[in-house]
Amino acid sequence: MNYDVIIIGAGSMGMAAGYFLSTSGKKTLLLDACTPPHNKGSHHGETRIIRYAYGEGEEYVPFVLRAQELWNDLEKATGKQLFLQTGVLNVGKEHSDFIQNTISSAKKYSLPLDILSSKEVHNRWPGITLPNDFIGCFEPTSGVLKCEESIKAYQELAELNGATILTNSQVKDILIKDDRVTIKTDNQTFYSDALVVSAGAWSGSLLSMLDLELPLSPVRKTFAWFQADEKMYHQDHFPAFTFETPNGQYYGFPSIDGAGLKVGRHDGGDQIHPDESILPFGELPEDKGDLIHFLHQYMPKISQLQYGKTCMYTLTPDEDFIIDLHPNYSNVAIAAGFSGHGFKFSSAVGQALSQLILSGQYDIDLSPFSINRFKN
Ligand SMILES: Cc1cc2nc3c(=O)[nH]c(=O)nc-3n(C[C@H](O)[C@H](O)[C@H](O)COP(=O)(O)OP(=O)(O)OC[C@H]3O[C@@H](n4cnc5c(N)ncnc54)[C@H](O)[C@@H]3O)c2cc1C
């Protein structure tokens, strides 16, 4: 069967790419090893934070602002609420890189950001207690995306545009000869003019089939929901948050639709192979221990664990993304290594992948995400 473009991996990035490519009239096939959205990759757990004043570096800001515009478009096109404007509170020591980048991103792009002392944070959200040398940077316009719902929304529109999505179809082999792409699953062979590889934690092994070795490390991550007093932690009056602490980086969400407060640790985690079964939540003492220790220190009114889950990050050495064309094949676009902060961008990543396939370029600078930064 012949297609204009085949996408390997119809998760966060791939499903969005499928939508944009199908919108441009390309005959598009998406292949996924599972049935997205699912809980075997990096996109489950109901919610993801989106913030614009970006602690990881101001080079991300134009890209995330585009992503938010595209999320708004997706909401309009489907009539679904995918974004909740809860605001995001970034907490840490004033001189930490993350806090300084957050403040400088806001200044450079004129983004609203309230800078609050530890006392002001506590007065505004009595559920948070901070040491005196911490500050809070509250971004009122940002918030939370419903991750599985967002993937379903792009799926719905891509299918309406005529894209074909084949689930439970794991790609086993990729061959490119004279610009012609051949893709094999266990029992089918497909052909196309162009290819997108957006296979999350599995991208490394798939790209080796195209003689490209990228420094990608899949890591086991855990997160959990805790019982929370709705008067204090409900989404209408409590923000999503990130914390830079001397004992690690944490993030979390208000209680949404009565689910409880969700919290996870961003740094750390054991390197894994994505094909091996992942230890369930609670099997390692730090799964619960880290979160309980964090809450005890900064949100001491919360202690009762409800349940937890595992998920995967795919880290690059600098924790910046990879969004680029294959160095040897100009008809292959790659999106990988989202290092635990990629979901918020996935709408714009989908648009970028589509543009890279259609014209070889994107109107936002993708050079921070290029493959050649790993040359040395
Ligand atoms: C616990 C946790 C919390 C996070 N919090 C945030 C947050 O608050 N904000 C934020 O922006 N980001 C966050 N992230 C990061 C974000 O979710 C990821 O960066 C993003 O989901 C990665 O998308 P992806 O498309 O690369 O991978 P996925 O969404 O996992 O998609 C990859 C797809 O490829 C498929 N696939 C793999 N191999 C094959 C094959 N051989 N053939 C066919 N299909 C294949 C898989 O089945 C999967 O569906 C978080 C991640 C985790 C795990």
Image (tube, grey):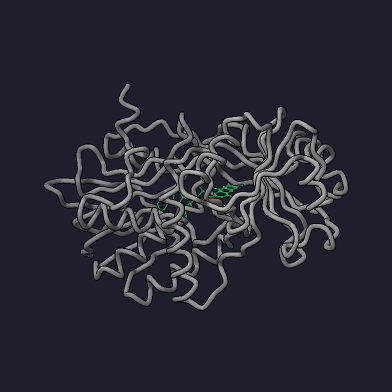
Q: How many labels does the image show?
A: 0
Q: In this view, does 323 lie above or below 293?
A: below
359 left or right of 103 in image = left
Residue placed farthest to the top in the image? 376
- Work out which residue is located at the far left of the displayed protein and give it: 178
In the rendered image, residue 250, in percent from the top left (x then y), is placed at: 68, 40
Image quadrant holding the C terminus, namely top left
The residue that appears at 23% across and 65% down in the rendered structure is: 1
**Nearer to us in this view, 190 or 295:** 295
**x and y, in percent, of residue 368 in the image:** 36, 37
Residue 352 against residue 269 in the figure, above or below: below
The reply to whether residue 280 is visible in this rendering is no
Residue 259 horizontal/vertical position (percent): 75, 62
**Residue at left 58%, top 59%?**
141
99 or 333: nearer the viewer: 99
Which image quarter: residue 55? top right
Which residue is pictured at 41% across the width and 50% down the height? 62
Q: Can residue 343 be seen in this view?
A: yes
In the depicted view, which residue is nearer to us: 203 or 59? 59
Position of residue 233 measured from the top left corner of the image (x, y, whole percent): 79, 57
Name the residue: 30% across, 68% down.
22
